[in-house]
Image (cartoon, rainbow, N blue to C red):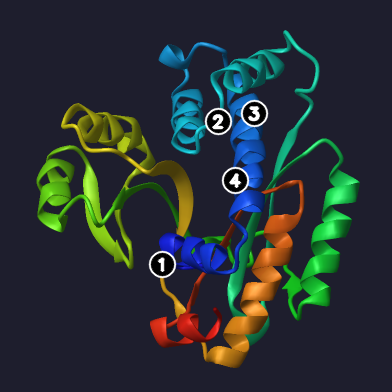
Amino acid sequence: MAGHSKWKNIQHRKGRQDAKRSKEFTRAAKEIIIAAKGGGNPAFNPRLRSAIAFAKSVSLPKERIESAIRKGTGEEAGGDLFEIVYEGYGPSGIAILVEVATDNRNRTVAEVRHIFTKYGGAMGEVGSVNWMFTKKGVLSFAKSRYSEEQLMEIGLENGAEDIVDEDESWEAHCEPGSFDSLRQAYEDAGIEVESAEISMLPQNTITVDAEAARKVVRLVEALEDNDDVQQVHSNVDIPDEVLAELE
């Protein structure tokens, strides 16, 4: 979804929190495993630092974080994972990026293609939609606790490009290279970061009606429910009044 927090709100309304939590644990552990292939010391591995920050934001237990690092460095079995990004189109021609971490490329591509086809989408060629997205650091904060001014004051001095209103949350967006320092600046100021991740944000969005929105939600949910899928990015924008209809 174009709005990270809006998508989380849909999942909450639909009572999918337990499944979502389990999925976040799996995703966080896989990201650490892959990041740790570049070295198990986060002090010298920026991607591993980011992966650990995300794992902590979803409350992944310390022992699972440490185990994932060992798997990535080869000290423990279970680290044979490959990163792949699939590109495709959903209902109404929306663009979709699917990031996966898998130990079986053939299985995963077959499953992802099947989901696209089943829910009214289609797989695309490499490069077909990737150009519509930009990699950014995304940090989320509870709107009930912090004002836009608070976040802006610290953010602008530490690499934030924008503070975005996402219904019940604020999001600070930054270049990936500023991600660690921006997160640290907020933490040093006593501001709790609800979630922190490197994501692919759409450069432009497509607004859809209720019928198309339902189709998009079903497609994205099916992709996210796949065990190998890490993240799903789309350039769809679902208006608030349509979100209410999806409850």
The Cα–Cα distance between marks 1 and 4, rounded to whole angstroms, is 28 Å
Marked residue nearer the N-terminal end (1 or 4): 4
Nearer to us in this view, 8 or 156: 8
Query: Which image quadrant for residue 163?
Result: bottom left
Q: Is residue 207 visible?
A: no
Please name the residue that numbered disc 1 is placed on. 203
Give the x, y percent position of residue 146: 19, 51
The Cα–Cα distance between marks 2 and 3, rounded to whole angstroms, is 16 Å
Q: Is residue 238 visible?
A: yes
Q: Is residue 94 left or right of residue 141?
A: right
Question: Is the residue marked by circle 2 packed among few (<14), some (14-19), or many (20+) residues within 10 Å?
Answer: some
Query: Which image quadrant for residue 69?
Result: top right
Please name the residue that numbered disc 3 is placed on. 34
Quadrant assignment for the C terminus: bottom right
Marked residue nearer the N-terminal end (2 or 3): 3
**Amino acid on which disc 1 is placed:** Gln
Residue drawn 44% across and 76% down?
Answer: 205
User: SS of the residue at dot 4?
Assistant: helix
**Amino acid on which disc 2 is placed:** Leu
**Amino acid on which disc 3 is placed:** Ile
Marked residue nearer the N-terminal end (4 or 3): 4
The Cα–Cα distance between marks 1 and 2, rounded to whole angstroms, is 31 Å
Marked residue nearer the N-terminal end (3 or 1): 3
Question: Is the residue marked by circle 4 packed among few (<14), some (14-19), or many (20+) residues within 10 Å?
Answer: some
Marked residue nearer the N-terminal end (2 or 4): 4
Please name the residue that numbered disc 2 is placed on. 60
Please name the residue that numbered disc 4 is placed on. 21
14 up-or-down from 101: above or below: below
The Cα–Cα distance between marks 3 and 1, rounded to whole angstroms, is 27 Å
Give the x, y percent position of residue 20: 61, 51
Question: Is the residue marked by circle 3 packed among few (<14), some (14-19), or many (20+) residues within 10 Å?
Answer: many
Question: Is the residue marked by circle 1 packed among few (<14), some (14-19), or many (20+) residues within 10 Å?
Answer: few
